[in-house]
Image (cartoon, coloured by chain):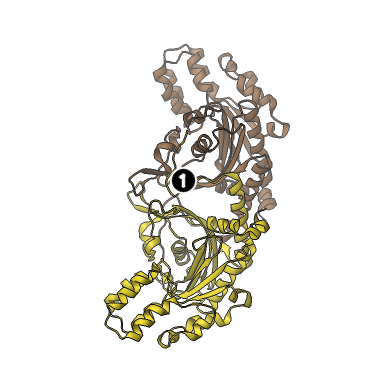
Chain colours: A yellow, B brown
Amino acid sequence: MIHPIPSGTRDVLPDEMRELRLISDALRKGFEDHGYREVYTPALEYEEVLGRAELAEAAPAYRLFDETGAALALRSDMTPPIARLVSTRYQDARPPLRFCYLAHCYRRVRPARGQSRELLQAGIELIGAPAPEGTVEVLTALCRTLDGTGLKDYRVGLGDASLFGALMARLGVPEHRRAALLGALVRRDFVLLERLVGEIDIDAQARRTLCEGPQLRGGIEVLQQAPGPLADALAGMREVAGRLPRDVADRVIFDLGLVREIGYYTGAVFEVYDPGLGAPLGGGGRYDELLGRFGRPLPAVGFAIGVEKLHIALAGEERGSGAMLR
Amino acid sequence: MIHPIPSGTRDVLPDEMRELRLISDALRKGFEDHGYREVYTPALEYEEVLGRAELAEAAPAYRLFDETGAALALRSDMTPPIARLVSTRYQDARPPLRFCYLAHCYRRVRPARGQSRELLQAGIELIGAPAPEGTVEVLTALCRTLDGTGLKDYRVGLGDASLFGALMARLGVPEHRRAALLGALVRRDFVLLERLVGEIDIDAQARRTLCEGPQLRGGIEVLQQAPGPLADALAGMREVAGRLPRDVADRVIFDLGLVREIGYYTGAVFEVYDPGLGAPLGGGGRYDELLGRFGRPLPAVGFAIGVEKLHIALAGEERGSGAMLR
């Protein structure tokens, strides 16, 4: 007899569960080895609390009501709960604070896209460490923790959430046009971006920079070769790039068009790719303004890895899975 | 700044989280050492599926609706999802099947009772092993797994969910009166039980047996000294008692009035007590009819331990906590 389960959810049977535990334990060990200590927050939060973060595409999808009629939501991301935790339980603690987590998050699914409604996320948050040092620390922890799981062929795309906004401002894109252009970039729809840019009354060179700049992607030379207006906006990325340890730098692909779906990022943003998986298996970035919205203004940076996605990537990397999962 | 979290939920900070992980790992190791393999099921299930189990007091408290308008619920107990899993994914697997889990469950809280809305539960399910052998196996796994966490002073109360029903039938309690009497016993309200029994037209000896029988509690002698009508109903408990290994038997307190709040239990029921905690830290029993409601009729038995409750009990047992948590 078949009893359905909600679309986007699944049962994990023992063979897979064993591998997910091995991966989770390796991630947790990696985080702890870098000084991050695990916390857990309730899966249910007041909707008002989660609403303080601009979660955009990752906004909580499931609302429910408690016995008193208060609106609760299932967390869709661990960063806002940890921002709440810091401002409530660590009001006077001296930064930087280092937390890690391994927890399920819940998101809306679009039908027939194979999206997960319930995600197991493993991540870290570094609170109170500004760029560039904090960013370098987190990118280093990311790569070395992934190395510890046995993942071999991954790359980390590194961009800056403020870059395109700065570029639009500098090139004279009217404010009311900017959101549409950014939306096209978030969806990586360069055809739409070009059409929208074509409708704006700026010179041809500026148009070309707006369309081609975000397509620049590659090694450190990308930061040097970028056209004038863009090059000036790249100071932050260059500062991070210059401080990365060699093994981490070797993983990084500079991507001037990288913009994440979550709205709270302010500076460096990054995503992890692996040939074993057709989508990013995790990502993160700086959120220097989020903590202030919870009452303890501190710069911060973090990332989350999708544990099930990492599992697929490891299984896809024959040698990697041989090392870790057997 | 204080941002509230829902009543009955809490943040787990690193020092406690570390201890909860140690306890969880010890429980998982104990389950696996006994041949139980871990599974995970979605936190969200269709309400209709969970509704097949008589969860009674532990019924799902949180309903929500997905994009299609289907009613979902947050699981309140892992046994119904595992019954669903067995009938869906293990339709043809040869029993017995042994599963374990470590997962959060969600329940309604009564205001100001200090109840938890979100519980971390660790447990096992043994599917396809009838009484008495299956019951003995699970009680043995329970005690030896608890031993592995370092808990020292616990006791296991052992009763039978069918006992009081059989007694009422045998002593001629009219059917329409039985639910009220059982309800009084579930709440351990012996004053109410006596009042209700006094209203029933049966002889004085039968009244005494109904009121005093469920208060019999102690060593193996309880099974021998029970008055006639009750003694006949104890065959099942005697069969289990006679097969328990010595170390397990030494932990057991026979409790002829033990009735659990969950309605799906059919035979042996048990609860774990520890002087370090004022409430049971876990429990379980036989649910020989539940699997049939999901389409694969098999006898079954299992238990769940509240990980946070076990943590409190361990902390309360000075020496125990010294062994495990340091």
B100 to B128, vertically: above or below: below
Q: Position of residue B321 (x, y in %)?
A: 66, 51
Residue flagged by tag 1: what amino acid is it?
A: Gln
- Locate residue A209: give its quadrant: bottom left
- How crowded is the residue under tag 1: few (<14 C-alpha within 10 Å), some, or many (20+)? some
Q: Position of residue B141 (x, y in %)?
A: 66, 37
Q: Position of residue A218 (x, y in %)?
A: 52, 77
- Horizontal side, residue B315 vs residue B85: left or right: right
Q: Chain of mark 1?
A: B
User: Is residue B315 visible to the viewer in this orientation of the structure?
Assistant: no
Residue B43 visible in this rendered orientation of the protein: yes
The quarter of the picture where the C terminus of chain B appears is bottom right
In this view of the protein, which residue sits in the foreground, B170 or B225? B170
Q: Can you name the residue that lies furthest to the right here? A: B246
Residue B270, located in which quarter of the rendered image? Answer: top right
Quarter location, residue A5: top left
**B311 or B191, which is in the foreground?**
B311
Report which residue position mark 1 lands on.
B115
The N terminus of chain B lies in quadrant = bottom left
At a point 30% along the width and 81% down the height, the residue shown is: A173
Q: Position of residue A166 (x, y in %)?
A: 38, 81
Q: Looking at this view, name the residue that lies furthest to the bottom.
A: A228
Label 1: which secondary element = loop
User: Which residue is nearer to you in this view: B48 or B165?
Assistant: B48
Indicate left or right for B292 with A292 as reference. Answer: right
